[in-house]
Image (cartoon, rainbow, N blue to C red):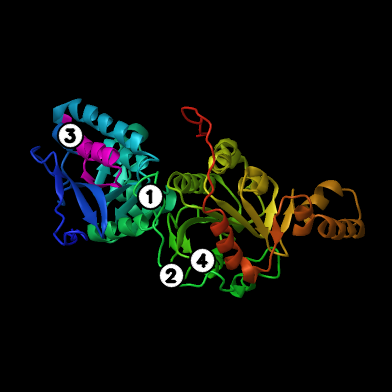
């Protein structure tokens, strides 16, 4: 743990506050300072042999979660547990259920984190799905059912690392927001994410020092776009050209690489950035990308971070398997997340914005506050070649070429969309940072009156 900080008003040290200190066992709950931020910290002791989850341990976890909710403080749990103690019967499962219920009540109220340093099996593993951000150490692993159960039920032999190592979950499941070396690095990563977030939903994030002029030109952003409409580039370089220098923090970077979700600052104001990534699947949207972006948008909306969306996508990734796995339902998750978001929302169309993906990526009619487009942006149901393939099936090559040229001139440009009110301004790419910073200033006092209801019925 970092050194105990001093109270700025009295000059005296601020001690940790133990919760449920009299409960025996390998779990401790404490209100402490994490790099200057007060948090509720619940920690399983570090050990090579992870302890099974017993009911007294769930009592400590519950005390921590309830304190986070009552005191409106971020909640962090460091997990190292081999699952419920079989010898104790149902008691630890009952205790875990109580913890899960309070963590659910914490959702959207205070930021919640898990650091996995060792195993997280069965009930403890499901905690990782409840929190906002999970950080896994390189030695950790997590799964609901272990290798023995997999072998008994399916006949497949699999090791614990193949099933649930940090690397496997990072690449294939999108569980960890980041993978780090050890427990201390996990605490540092939680602190870094927290630097963009407020303590609770009724506060705004603290502003960062302004070290990068808001009106700085960012000509490099436009220069990154290839002349060919099908050429690829790394959208993270575009993001870095627009935001404050050295403020980018990408989360879940290895999962669903066709979309980038990241925290950043613009003129010192923390923001969330969602951007299509042409380097992966040409920037199309599939199920993992929709889920990843929807979760991030919902998190930004819960904790008062403006959302900047950078669009360059030819549409949804086509395929029978994708449709059968629920592309409609999961694509709707991203629509739902944007549609209910009330924070300031700024959309910048970098190049392509086609079809259903145009709607999903925070289009004007989805309720964004400011929609900007670069001069070569293409907004349409589909590209000229695709339109010709459908509408000019029986035409000659010359007729099809003429159709494509006319289609591109009349429809595939941002000025047509601007005339119809779908784009607020067509801007020089070099002015993007300045325009975004000005829009954020204008929207700083944005407030929306929410409809009184218990909750929306999120598509799952």
Residue visible at 54% across and 59% down? 441
Q: CA distance from mark 4 to mark 3?
A: 44 Å
Q: Quadrant of residue 27?
A: top left
Q: CA distance from mark 2 to mark 4?
A: 8 Å
Q: CA distance from mark 3 to mark 2?
A: 41 Å
Q: CA distance from mark 3 to mark 1?
A: 29 Å
- Label 3 crowding class (10 Å Cα cut-off): few <14, some 14-19, many 20+? many
Asked if residue 72 lies in the magenta stretch, the reply is yes
Query: Looking at the image, do the residues carrying marks 2 and 4 touch, with CB atoms under 8 Å apart?
Result: no
- Label 4 crowding class (10 Å Cα cut-off): few <14, some 14-19, many 20+? many
Query: Looking at the image, do the residues carrying marks 3 and 1 touch, with CB atoms under 8 Å apart?
Result: no
The numbered mark, 4 or 3, whose residue comes first in the sequence reads 3
* Above or below: residue 272 compared with residue 86: below
Query: Where is residue 383 shown, x and y percent of the image?
Result: 75, 54
Residue at the farthest top position:
90
| Residue that label 4 marks | 243
Question: 286 or 324, which lies in front?
Answer: 286
| Residue that label 2 marks | 246
Query: Where is residue 237 shown, x and y percent of the image?
Result: 53, 68
The numbered mark, 3 or 2, whose residue comes first in the sequence reads 3
| Residue that label 3 marks | 59
- Label 2 crowding class (10 Å Cα cut-off): few <14, some 14-19, many 20+? few
Question: Taking 219 as reference, is 107 left or right?
Answer: left
Q: Regarding mark 1 in the picture, which secondary structure is present there?
A: helix
* Above or below: residue 186 compared with residue 338: below
Query: Where is residue 345 shown, x and y percent of the image?
Result: 57, 51
State whether residue 276 appears in this view.
no
Q: Regarding mark 4 in the picture, which secondary structure is present there?
A: loop
Query: Looking at the image, do the residues carrying marks 3 and 2 touch, with CB atoms under 8 Å apart?
Result: no
Start-end of magenta stretch: 61-86
Residue mark closest to the camera, 4 vs 1: 4
Q: CA distance from mark 4 to mark 1?
A: 30 Å
């Amino acid at each position: 743990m970092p050194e105990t900080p001093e109270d700025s008003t009295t000059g005296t040290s601020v001690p940790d506050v133990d919760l449920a200190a009299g409960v025996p066992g390998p779990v401790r709950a404490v209100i402490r300072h994490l790099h200057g931020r007060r948090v509720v910290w619940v920690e399983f002791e570090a050990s090579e042999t992870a302890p099974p989850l017993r009911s007294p341990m769930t009592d400590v976890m519950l005390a921590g979660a309830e304190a986070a909710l009552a005191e409106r403080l971020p909640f962090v749990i460091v997990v190292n547990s081999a699952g419920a103690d079989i010898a104790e019967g149902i008691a630890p499962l009952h205790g875990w259920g109580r913890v899960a219920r309070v963590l659910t009540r914490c959702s959207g109220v205070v930021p919640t984190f898990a650091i996995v340093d060792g195993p997280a099996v069965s009930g403890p593993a499901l905690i990782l799905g409840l929190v906002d951000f999970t950080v896994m150490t390189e030695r950790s692993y997590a799964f609901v059912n272990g290798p023995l159960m997999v072998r008994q039920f399916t006949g497949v032999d699999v090791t614990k690392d193949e099933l649930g190592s940090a690397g496997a979950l990072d690449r294939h499941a999108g569980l960890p927001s980041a993978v780090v070396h050890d427990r201390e690095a996990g605490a540092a990563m939680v602190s870094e994410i927290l630097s963009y977030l407020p303590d609770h939903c009724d506060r705004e994030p603290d502003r960062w020092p302004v070290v990068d002029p808001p009106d700085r030109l960012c000509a490099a952003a436009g220069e990154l776009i290839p002349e060919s409409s099908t050429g690829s580039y790394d959208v993270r370089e575009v993001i870095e050209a627009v935001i404050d220098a050295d403020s980018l923090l990408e989360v879940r970077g290895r999962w669903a690489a066709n979309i980038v979700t990241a925290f950043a600052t613009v003129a010192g104001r923390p923001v969330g950035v969602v951007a299509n990534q042409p380097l992966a699947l040409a920037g199309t949207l599939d199920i993992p990308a929709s889920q990843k972006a929807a979760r991030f948008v919902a998190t930004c909306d819960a904790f008062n971070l403006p959302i900047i969306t950078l669009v360059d996508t030819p549409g949804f990734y086509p395929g029978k398997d994708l449709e059968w796995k629920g592309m409609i339902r999961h694509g709707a998750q991203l629509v739902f997340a944007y549609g209910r978001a009330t924070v300031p929302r700024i959309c910048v169309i970098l190049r392509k914005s086609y079809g259903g993906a145009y709607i999903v990526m925070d289009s004007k009619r989805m309720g964004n506050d400011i929609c900007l487009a670069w001069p070569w942006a293409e907004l349409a149901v589909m590209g000229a070649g695709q339109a010709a393939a459908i509408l000019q099936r029986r035409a000659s090559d010359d007729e099809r070429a003429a159709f494509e040229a006319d289609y591109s001139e009349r429809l595939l440009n941002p000025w047509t969309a601007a005339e119809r009110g779908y784009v607020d301004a067509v801007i020089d790419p070099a002015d993007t940072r300045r325009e975004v910073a000005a829009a954020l200033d204008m929207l700083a006092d944005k407030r929306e009156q929410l409809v009184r209801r218990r909750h929306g019925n999120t598509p799952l």
